[in-house]
């Protein structure tokens, strides 16, 4: 698990991952403010944003995401229809 984001409660972590995966229109600055407004510190918000490209470009298996599983993240490969390591 990401050592900086490890302190987040599971509900807040789910919120962060949901935003990273689904918000394609907000700028990084807008998303940073949104995270801070919803309870993250600026440091936590910036760390979460560092994962934005990964979450927008891949579908991850629940519990095996870049934030929660780091070296064991599994993304969906649409060609093989399987989850594969990053």
Image (tube, rainbow, N blue to C red):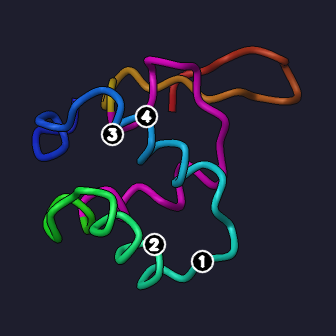
Could you say where residue 58 lies in the image, as x and y percent from the top left? 65, 43
Q: Earlier in the sequence, mark 3 or mark 1?
A: 3
Determine which quarter of the picture holds residue 46. Answer: bottom left
Determine which quarter of the picture holds residue 75. Answer: top right
56 vs 15, left or right, is: right
Query: Which residue position holds label 3?
Result: 12
Query: Which residue position holds label 2?
Result: 31
Q: Earlier in the sequence, mark 3 or mark 2?
A: 3
Q: In the image, which disc is placed on residue 41?
A: none
Foreground pick, 57 / 5: 5
The residue positioned 27% from the left and 68% from the top of the image is 36
The residue positioned 75% from the left and 14% from the top of the image is 82
Query: Which residue position holds label 1?
Result: 26
Q: Earlier in the sequence, mark 1 or mark 2?
A: 1
Badge 4, how many Cα within 10 Å: few under 14, some, many 20+? Answer: few
Helix, strand or loop at label 1? It is loop
Could you say where residue 49 lies in the image, as x and y percent from the top left? 37, 64
State yes or no: discs 4 and 3 in contact (Cβ < 8 Å).
Answer: yes
State yes or no: discs 1 and 2 in contact (Cβ < 8 Å).
Answer: yes
Q: Which residues are magenta?
A: 47-67
Locate the N terminus by quadrant: top left
CA gap, disc 3 and disc 1? 19 Å
The residue positioned 41% from the left and 48% from the top of the image is 16
Query: Which residue position holds label 4?
Result: 14
Helix, strand or loop at label 3? It is helix
State yes or no: discs 3 and 1 in contact (Cβ < 8 Å).
Answer: no
Helix, strand or loop at label 2? It is helix
State yes or no: discs 3 and 2 in contact (Cβ < 8 Å).
Answer: no
Badge 1, how many Cα within 10 Å: few under 14, some, many 20+? Answer: few
């Amino acid at each position: 698990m990401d050592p900086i984001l490890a302190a987040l409660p599971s509900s807040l972590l789910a919120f962060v991952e949901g935003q990273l995966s689904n918000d394609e229109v907000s700028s990084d600055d807008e998303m940073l403010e949104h995270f801070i407004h919803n309870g993250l510190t600026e440091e936590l918000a910036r760390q979460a944003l560092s994962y934005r490209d990964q979450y927008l470009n891949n579908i991850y298996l629940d519990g095996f995401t870049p934030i929660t599983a780091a070296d064991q993240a599994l993304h969906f490969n649409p060609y093989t229809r399987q989850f594969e390591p990053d």
